Image (cartoon, rainbow, N blue to C red):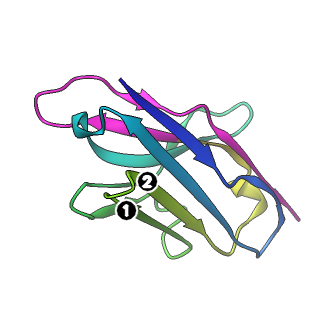
Amino acid sequence: QVQLVESGGGLVQAGRSLRLSCAASGNTFSINTMGWYRQAPGKQRGLVAYITRGGIPIYADSVKGRFIISRDNLKNTVYLQMNSLKPEDTAVYYCKADPALGYSDVYWGQGTQVTVSS
């Protein structure tokens, strides 16, 4: 089992920045790619960004150039630096961990609310 604990959400004005963290614990050898998804009210959960264990990032078009994903494998933690925030970035942000080769379980964190006021 792997536990994911997110932190860093909150209320911020448009144009400002926030940094989310997601710390993994437990059988962390069983996970590979980690990432962030978000879900706004009335909308489906969608990809924000993910990063492989080797450090290769992928971003949704809506956040390219504004958000930066990174990870510290020694701390089993993934970060999402969110800059130039917009009201449309308001959502619950979820951390996700995908299984490493030979494993099958996908893990989700409980989510952290990000609210961007105009």
- Type of residue at label 2? Thr
Tell me the residue at 34%/27% (across/down). Answer: 106
Q: What's the mark number on residue 72?
A: 1
Q: Nearer the viewer, residue 103 or 29?
A: 29
* Residue 16 x, y percent position in the rendering: 76, 74
Report the span colored magenta: 95-118
Q: Is 111 a magenta residue?
A: yes
Q: Quadrant of the N terminus?
A: top left
Q: Is label 1 in contact with label 2 (beta carbons under 8 Å)?
A: yes
Alpha-carbon span between mark 1 and mark 2: 5 Å
Tell me the residue at 43%/42% (across/down). Answer: 24
Q: Is residue 61 above or below residue 101?
A: below
Q: Is 1 a magenta residue?
A: no
* Residue 38 x, y percent position in the rendering: 59, 43
* Residue 58 x, y percent position in the rendering: 35, 60
Label 1 secondary element: strand
Task: Check disc 2 and report the residue beneath it.
Answer: 77
Question: How many residues crowd around disc 2 within 10 Å: few (fewer than 14), some, or many (20 or more)?
Answer: some
